[in-house]
Each structure stands twice: as structure tokens, then as C-alpha cells.
Image: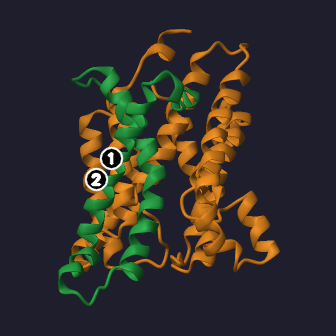
Chain colours: A green, B orange
Amino acid sequence: MKMKGSNSTFKYLRDMSIILYMVQFILIWLYDGACNKWIETDTVAYNILQYSVTRFIVITAVSISIAWLILTLEKRPRLSFLQYLH
Amino acid sequence: MNTAQKQYLPGLDLLKFILAVLIISAHCHFLNEFPAIQQWWSRLTSIAVPLFFGISSFLFFRKIYSLPKDSNTSPILIHSIKRLAILFICWYVLMIPMTYFRFYSVATLKETIYAILFSCCFNGYWFIKALIINTTILYFCRRTKALIICSFMAFLVYIYCSFNYIYHYNPLLESLHPYYSFYYHTAYFCVGALFARFHDRFHFDKWHIGVLFVFWIILNIFNNFNFFTLYIDYPHLLSFFPFSIK
């Protein structure tokens, strides 16, 4: 498969996909817990959080942000943990 | 290290990222408010996990088969298992709060032992366990004849598990479901290993892929009208595509 772009970009995406897969379960659990217990769903303005589209967008965005943060910290020599996975 | 080992396939990494997003959408029950579209979307997302398995198996056995026949391949297996074990332990520790409330507080001892060894105590980490077990099994069946026999048996198990398939949403039942056990997915590992073994012989061109894609759509139409009691994720046929494109 010939792809445009540098290999490092694709390797970055590979690392990101591992983190996305792991982080999403915790985020979904927290999001559902927050929606069911902590947020008053009687308030009409909060009803949007119950939609699956909102849920997907929020969880994907937060997961990608966390993955970006982890991969940025990974560049620091003292915090590089993902090296053990390669 | 020879050329086959050095050759890097960036497309598979891009595909992995897309599949990870598809998995998130499946776990978020994306488009749940629109059942007609959701049914089709779930067909698409159901391909993600088998493809992940297929790609992992393909990349692993590509390394194994690229080495000369008499060479020692066990370091490749040890490295792979070690890497997965680190990921598994980290994940296990992270998941303890959720696992306890959703599984251990309600499961019996028998269910706990089964889940720890073969299945899962929480959605998600069954995936790494399946990777570790299936990679090890197929490594010992890596000779051509053994691989073909193993693939045939894995396919039979897959068909057997697919009869009257009912997806349980109960966390406890879900944890003990065949889908979350390694043997349900051995067939996909075999697909990856077979492609790595016979990649040069069974190379698809664009026309073949087009025909397979049309076949996939027809099967989806049949599946969505519930004509069969046998449930098989037909989109999994797409698992063949990424390995077949040059």
C-alpha cells in the first residue's frame, strides 16, 4: 500500500489508536455515570448530553486530546513508557 | 533482517486509527436515536475488531514467514507476548474500580475463574487476552498443514458459536459470552496468518475487491431483513481487503 505522508505520521496514528482504544472505556464509564447521577436531566439544556451523537463527539474529542497529551509527554525522556510497547 | 521485515505498511496504521474511532462509535451506541441508519452503521463498525485481529496476526506472521525455515523464531513470539502482557497489566490495574462493581461483586467463583482465564471481567481487555492466546496457539501451528487444519477448525467453531447468536447487554452475561472469548476470534487470526503465508499466491486485484464489495452489500441486505437464524457478521469479509491491496 503506497501512502502519501511521512511514516512517522502513520506511526504516531498507530500509537494514538492504542491509547484511544484503552482510554475510551474509562471515558464512556465516567460520561454515563455523570449523565445518570450528577447531571440533572430534568433541565432541558442538559438533554443534549444524552444523545449518542453528542456522546460520540465528546468522548472521541477527549480521547484524542488525552492521546495527544500522552504522546507529547512521551517525548520527554523521563516519561517515555510507550517505548516498552515497540 | 530481510526486505520483507523492513518493508513498512503505513496504510495499516492509518486503518488502525480509523478502526479505533469506529470502535468508539460502536461503544457510544452512535446514531442510536435513528434505528434505520444505526443498523447499517453497526454493520460497518462490527468489522473493526476482526480487522484488528486480522492485521495483528498478518503483521506477526509476516515477520515469522520472512525468516529462513531453520531460523529461531521464538524471540519474535516472546517479544510480542511481552509487549501485550505489559499493556494487559496496565489495563487491568486501570480497570479495577469498574471491574469490581460490574463483575466481581456479582460473579460466582466459577464465573470469575472462567472470565480470568478465557473471557473477560469487563468489556475491553478480553481483546488483549484473545491476542495473547491466539498468537501463541497459531505460532505453534505455523507450519502450512497445521495452519490450514487449525483454520478449518477455527472456522467451524466460529460457525457453531454464531448459531442463534444473541447479544446480551447484562454485564455479567456479556462477560461470559463467546464473543468475548478467544476461540470466537481464532478464525480471524487464521485469516491474517493465511494471508501472510500465501500473500503472493492469493493476491486480489481491484476487480476482485469490487466484486467482494458488491457481495458484501447483498449479504448485508439479506442480513438486515433477518432471513437467517445464523448470525454471522458479513462485513467481516472486508477483513480481506487491506491485505490484498498493494
SS for callout 1: helix
Q: Residue furthest bottom?
A: A42
Type of amino acid at the residue the image marks with label 2: Ala
Left or right, B125 with respect to A40, comes to right
Answer above or below: position of B151 versus A27.
above
Crowding near pointer 1: few (<14 within 10 Å), some, many (20+)? some
Which residue, given by chain and number where applicable, does mark 1 sit on? A64
The answer to whether B152 is drawn above or below residue B9 in the figure is: below
* Mark 1 belongs to chain: A
Q: Are marks 2 and 1 in contact (CB under 8 Å)?
A: yes
Image mark count: 2
Residue B12 visible within the image? no
The chain ID associated with circle 2 is A
Q: Of B120 and B37, which appears nearest the observer? A: B120
The residue located at (62%, 74%) in the rendering is B101
| Mark 2 and mark 1: Cα distance apart in space | 5 Å
- The residue at 24%/79% (across/down) is B33
- Closer to us: A14 or B160: A14
Dot 1 amino acid type: Ile
Identify the residue under disc 2: A61
Figure quadrant of residue B159? bottom right
Q: Residue at x 70, y 80 (%)?
A: B106
Residue B13 makes an appearance in the image: yes
Identify the image quadrant of the C terminus of chain B.
top left
The residue at the far right in this view is B109
Residue B9 image point, x, y percent: 38, 25
The image position of residue B218, as x and y in percent, is 28, 63
Residue at the spot 25% in from the left edge and 25% down from the top edge: A3
Q: Is residue B68 left or right of residue B7?
A: right
